[in-house]
Amino acid sequence: MRLKHVKGASLRVESSSYVVQDPQKYRSKMQSFFPKKQPIHLEIGMGKGKFLFENAKRNGDINYIGIEKYDSVLIRALDKLEMEPLENVKLFCIDANMIDTLFDHEIDLLYLNFSDPWPKERHSKRRLTSSFFLKKYDTIFQNTKRIILKTDNRKFFEFSVKSFTDYGYQIDSICLNLYEENLSSNIPTEYEEKFHKKGYPIYQIEVHKQ
């Protein structure tokens, strides 16, 4: 799908106080962006920011960082934050491949929501749950490595379950149809709402590794 260009997106992203410019310069210093030193939760591929924004509103005792590669998408999150400012949110406009250059044992929980499944086998290394990326994540977590994944793609989900367990992660919970469960604590992403309305099952897995 071709990404729609948004006029002025780059300028807005570069001038926003919510977006950290050159975040690699602040490796090991991420807490300095927030007024309170508290756990940091990270979302890779945050899209328009609904999931991150709602979590930050509900959980003032957690700091949130969202990563999005495209400024034309990230500004939709900026729209939300400018309408309702939150001090426990920061955004990075950067490729996920740079993840291991950004954090030095600073993250408590990683969210992977509706990541690109890269369905062709020759592209499997690009999947955010491949061993290539799991190795990158080793250096970002502060203590226990904790990941929560949601997707509508069954093959990507099955790949991810195997990849997690092969890499030594333990499964804390697994769900083959999230909307058959108690959803009181679930915060949907924009993609999730779209896929659920079409009748697609939403898969979720929570894993950890010491």
Image: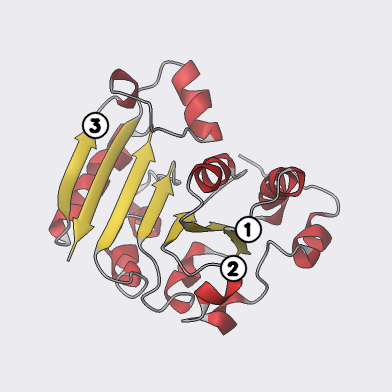
Say if residue 127 shows up in the picture. Answer: no
Res. 98 visible in picture: yes
- Residue at the location (33% across, 75% down)? 139
How many neighbours does mark 1 have within 10 angstroms: few (below 14), some (14-19), or many (20 or more)? some
For this rendering, which residue is in front, 139 or 123? Answer: 139
Of tags 3 and 1, the one toward the viewer is 1
Query: For the residue labelled by badge 2, is the local secondary structure a helix, a strand or a loop?
Result: loop
Of the two numbered discs 3 and 1 on the same chain, state the one appearing first in sequence.
1
Q: Distance between the residues labelled 3 and 1?
A: 33 Å
Q: What element carries label 1?
A: loop
Q: Quadrant of the C terminus?
A: bottom left
Give the label on residue 175, or none. 3
- Determine which residue is flagged by label 2: 35
In the picture shown, does residue 130 fall above or below 157?
below
Disc sitting over residue 87 in the figure: 1
- Mark 3, secondary structure of its residue: strand
Q: Which corner quadrant holds the N terminus?
A: top right
How many numbered circles does the render carry? Answer: 3
Nearest to N terminus: mark 2 or mark 1: 2
Q: Which residue is drawn at 40% across and 72% down?
A: 106
Task: Tell me which numbered mark, 3 or 2, is placed earlier along the sequence.
Answer: 2
199 to 89, vertically: above or below: above
Query: Left or right: where does residue 41 sit relative to residue 168?
Result: right
The image quadrant of residue 180 is top left
Q: Where is residue 52 in the image (x, y as percent from the top left)?
A: 53, 47
Task: Answer whether labels 2 and 1 touch (C-beta < 8 Å).
Answer: yes
Whether pointer 3 and pointer 2 mark residues with C-beta atoms closer than 8 Å, the reply is: no
| Residue type pointed to by label 3 | Cys
